Structures are given as C-alpha cells and as structure tokens.
Amino acid sequence: MEDIAAAANGENGALCAATERRRLALGHGKARRRSDQEDRNGIGKAGSVSELLDLAIAAHGGMERWRSLNTISVRISVGGGLLAAKWKLHALRGEGRVECSKPSAVFSPYSGPGRSGVFEPNKVWIETEDGNLLQERKDPRAAFRGLRRTIYWDYLDLLYFAGYALWNYLCAPFFLALPDFELREIEPWDEKGERWRRLQVHFPPSIPSHSREQVFYFDERGLIRRLDYTAEPVGSWAKAAHYCFEHKTFSGLVVPTRRRVVPRRADGRTLPGPTLVWIEIADVTPYQS
C-alpha cells in the first residue's frame, strides 16, 4: 500500500518508476505464460501489454496529470436491481470522494442527513458531521459470509461494497501500472460493430475489488468501455458485465459519466437485462496535491 501512496503524491516519481518496472518485468518473461496461438497472433506479449496500458492511461488524462492529484470528488446517483433487492435503492445519492493515493472513499450524506459513510479496506464506519462515530464494522468483507447478506444489506454492508467499487472505478486504469498487478492481453472482443482490446487483470490482495480476476475492455482510443468480474460480496454466481458510457473530460481527467451492469453468460455474451446496477456521475472535481 505504501507504493500506492507514494505514487499518487509524486514522491520520487514512484508510479512512473512502477510503470517502468512493469515494462522491465514483462520484458524479462514475468508476464503470465501465453499459448503458442497467442505467440503467433502477438497477443499476450509483453510489448502489447505495455503499449495497451500506455494507450489507456493517456486516453484517461495521462500519468503526469494523475500523479498531480490528491482526491476526486463526484456527484453520484446509483440504482438498479441489486440495490432494490438489498433494500437500499436510494441510499447512494449525493457526494462521493476518493483518495487517489490509497483505497479510501467517503459518501455524504449517507444513511441520513448530517451523516457520512467512510470506507477503508479493513474498516467502514458512519459518523456525524462533527466526526462522532455512530456505527463501525471491522473486516467488513468477511461479514458478507452470513446468511442475512443474501437477502438484506445494512448500511455498513453497502458502504463497503460501494466504497471499494467507487475507488476502483475512478482510479482505473492508472492503478494497473502498479507492479503487484498481473496483466495479460487476451484476444480482442467484437461488440456492436466495434473491436475492443482486452486486458486480463489479476488484482493483488492489498487492493479490494469485486474479484481478483477481471477483464478490462478498451476501444481504439484506449477508453475503458467494459469490465467483466464476479461481484463476490453478492455471490460466486454474480458474474457481471459492466459498461461505461459518455466519457467526459474534467480538468484534464477523462471519466465515464454513465455506467450499467448486466448479467454475463459463461461465453462472455451479456443478457439484455435486468440492469443490476446503474451509475450516473456528474460534477467531477479533481483536487491537486
């Protein structure tokens, strides 16, 4: 986690150094093993991974701009079948703020007027505007193993889920340059008349996310258009395709302002519905260090 903090604050150019270390590591055969077919097609090679990651980072504002940031604030509205099923349909309407240096997020108001919800990987809590603690839960991911979470989430459950999700969504693709992530370019994907390049990503344990294994889809400009993952806090069966739309530029940072999550079949194709989660983002404000 110290690598992440140093990266976003620009200490000794850590994130740029991490990107270079990734290039060197991949160049020395430390990328995941690729098949002969992948060798013939040029897919999965170290150079293609580095080139695609560079393209994606540049398309979303560039590493120099990212390294200058401390936090990102957004106006967020979230809904969909998942929140309705957990009895929290209108719980995420307001301001969301993430730290660029480490997985951390704050939602305000949260669970009621004058309250905020704070997410950190190993703890979530709800506090008043004056900082008085109202509720907290340590090791919040472990709490999803209980039977109750299959039919109902309390505000601390949702806070953990939404906190790591928002951090992931606003900080991608920049965190993919960190050395603990394992990246591999896989076969491109054709959808709705477009061809998207894909990165298969293995997340390190230090970064909370939906699942350790995910696939990122990038269009010809390098913009993230889709993510595939299993929403493990929901269940091992919760295989989802997460689409990103309407990318806009805010003070040099490019962010998709609409997202939609739908069920994903085993072959990677998606079902037209139901919409599991929808997200609308506005008023994106990056704050510099």
Image (cartoon, helix red, strand yellow):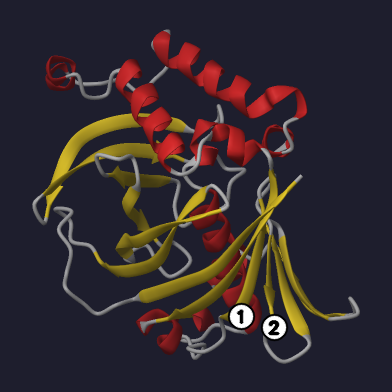
Q: Quadrant of the C terminus?
A: top right
Label 1 Cα crowd, 10 Å radius (few <14 / some 14-19 / many 20+): some
Q: Amino acid at mark 1?
A: Gly
- Tell me where residue 284 sits by quadrant: bottom right
Q: Is residue 159 left or right of residue 275?
A: right
Query: The residue tagged with tag 1: helix, strand or loop?
Result: strand
Q: To which quarter of the image does residue 221 belong?
A: top left
Q: Residue at x 51, y 71 (%)?
A: 282
Residue 225 image label: none
In the rendered image of this protein, does residue 235 appear above or below residue 250? below
Q: Secondary structure at mark 2?
A: loop
In the displayed structure image, the side of residue 268 where residue 141 appears, left or right: right
In the displayed structure, would residue 143 be above or below residue 15?
A: below
- Say what amino acid the circle numbered 2 marks: Pro
Q: Residue at x 57, y 86 (%)?
A: 91
Residue toward you, 237 or 193: 193
Q: Is residue 186 above or below residue 138?
A: above
Image position, residue 41 (x, y; %):
13, 20
- Which image quarter holds the N terminus? top right
Residue 92 location (% of width, % of height): 56, 81
Q: Does residue 164 appear left or right of residue 45 in this picture?
A: right
Pointer 2 residue: 109
Q: Earlier in the sequence, mark 1 or mark 2?
A: 1
Q: Residue at x 89, y 76 (%)?
A: 131
Identify the residue position indicated by label 1 in the image.
94
